[in-house]
Amino acid sequence: MPRPSNTEERRQQIVDGLLKVMAERGYERASVGEIAKAAGLSPGLVHYHFSDKQEILLVLVEQLASRARIRVTMRLARVKGDDARAKVDAFIDAFLATGGDAAPSAVASWVTISAEAIRQPEVRAAYDRVVKADLEQLELLVAAVVGKRRARTIAAGLFAAVQGYFVLSASAPDLVPPGSAAGTVKRMAAGLLDTVEAREDA
């Protein structure tokens, strides 16, 4: 595999610098100088590689989405056979489970990105694409358990719970018992899926 170019390495350092600063201070207080400092570069190099702070943020949105997709793919690959319920749990685990692949700074940054999506149309468009793709994947997994008719409503509720845990863990971490998020949302999923299956069987 070829070695990344110096330009790619510098751009990645800058994106990682924004991630670090944003997780600690939010987007508004992530000045180019602070991003450069966190990246170990000069502000001039940040300006050389990116036209503005928003461009860095949009790259970060895509990278965080890509990392989340990789986690989902890896968790789904661990499910044996065609256990549809286990696949729903694996999806939830990919977003909320603690462990070696957990990324608290990414979660904190994602919460900030969701706030910026309200304020900035370009960020909203990128955010919408990511959330839509994630929600569609969860809907397909849920549909394999309960069928298409109720899958969207259940998937939206579960995904809202995931996003809610993101906000709580980033803004009020003391309110979330450590390691509780994935288990709680999986129990919610089981309750919703059981209810629908029971109605279908009645």
Image: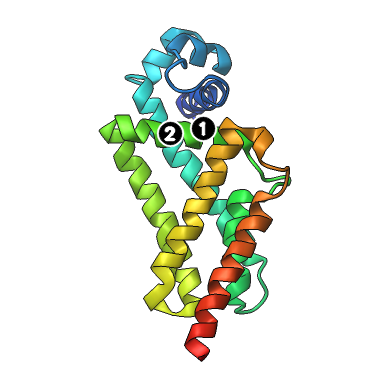
Quarter-of-image position of residue 55? top left
> Is residue 171 something that shows in the picture?
yes
Q: Position of residue 141 (x, y in %)?
A: 50, 70
Please tell me which residue lies in front, 120 or 72. Answer: 120
Circle 1 packing at 10 Å, graded few (<14), some (14-19), many (20+), is many
- Reading the image, the residue beneath label 2 is 113
Q: In the figure, is residue 192 to the left or right of 46?
A: right
Helix, strand or loop under label 2: helix
Q: Position of residue 131 (x, y in %)?
A: 40, 50
Kindly identify the residue that appears in the image at 60 percent across and 54 percent down: 94
Kind of residue at disc 2? Ile
Quadrant of the drawing holding the N terminus: top right
Q: In this view of the protein, which residue sits in the foreground, 161 or 128?
A: 161
Q: Give the side of residue 74 with respect to residue 60, left or right.
A: right
- Horizontal and vertical percent position of residue 79: 66, 70
Q: Please tell me whether residue 8 is drawn above or below residue 78 in the rendered image.
A: above
Residue of label 1: 109
Q: CA distance from mark 1 to mark 2?
A: 6 Å
Image position of 154 with respect to 54: above or below: below
